[in-house]
Image (tube, rainbow, N blue to C red):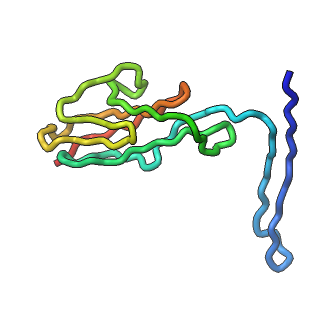
Amino acid sequence: MEQVLIKIFFVTAYVNDKVKQTKHIRLSSATEVSERVIFDNPQKTVTAGQTLNLSAQLYDQYKQPMSGKTMAYQISEDITGNVVKAISGVSVDQSGNLTVASSVPRGTIIVVTAKADGKYQSCTLKVTN
């Protein structure tokens, strides 16, 4: 059984002898575990004929970005991300770049799902012209 070391610290900043801010710091030797995927710059709309970057990041239990994990992107049927959906004129590459052709009708709903290490997040966008 692995022994986990945890240290807890409080750091307080003073200005003119008054407490300005206190931070709680927790240090742990526990191995990082992926907790959630978050889109860097989630959008609500995309213009037909536009390419939009929707890159996402995987975070650990300490809310720190994790490296070394591959993010996969797909167009999904719904926000669960379980079913891949093909939409004519819409594609997403593995860098999170969503391309919407000018022929995609206004009002089309696009769900982009980012997945890594068993975690996922979906971003829903509406096509505008």
Residue 113 lies left or right of residue 4; in this view the side is left
Residue found farthest to the left: 103
Pinpoint residue 25: horizontal percent, then vertical percent.
79, 51
At a point 29% along the width and 24% down the height, the residue shown is 85
Name the one closer to the observer, 80 or 28. Answer: 28
At a point 26% along the width and 35% down the height, the residue shown is 91
Pinpoint residue 20: horizontal percent, then vertical percent.
77, 69
Residue 60 lies left or right of residue 4; in this view the side is left
Pinpoint residue 9: horizontal percent, then vertical percent.
86, 52
At a point 39% along the width and 33% down the height, the residue shown is 73
Pinpoint residue 78: horizontal percent, then vertical percent.
36, 26
Question: Image height check: is 52 above or below 78?
Answer: below
Question: Image height check: is 118 above or below 114?
Answer: above
Residue 60 lies left or right of residue 7; in this view the side is left
At a point 25% along the width and 25% down the height, the residue shown is 86
Query: On the rendered image, what quadrant is the N terminus found in?
Result: top right
Residue found farthest to the bottom: 16
Question: Image height check: is 82 above or below 21?
Answer: above
Number of callouts:
0
Which of the 4 image quarters holds residue 35?
top right
Which of the 4 image quarters holds residue 21?
bottom right
Which of the 4 image quarters holds residue 67?
top right
Name the one closer to the observer, 116 or 62. Answer: 116
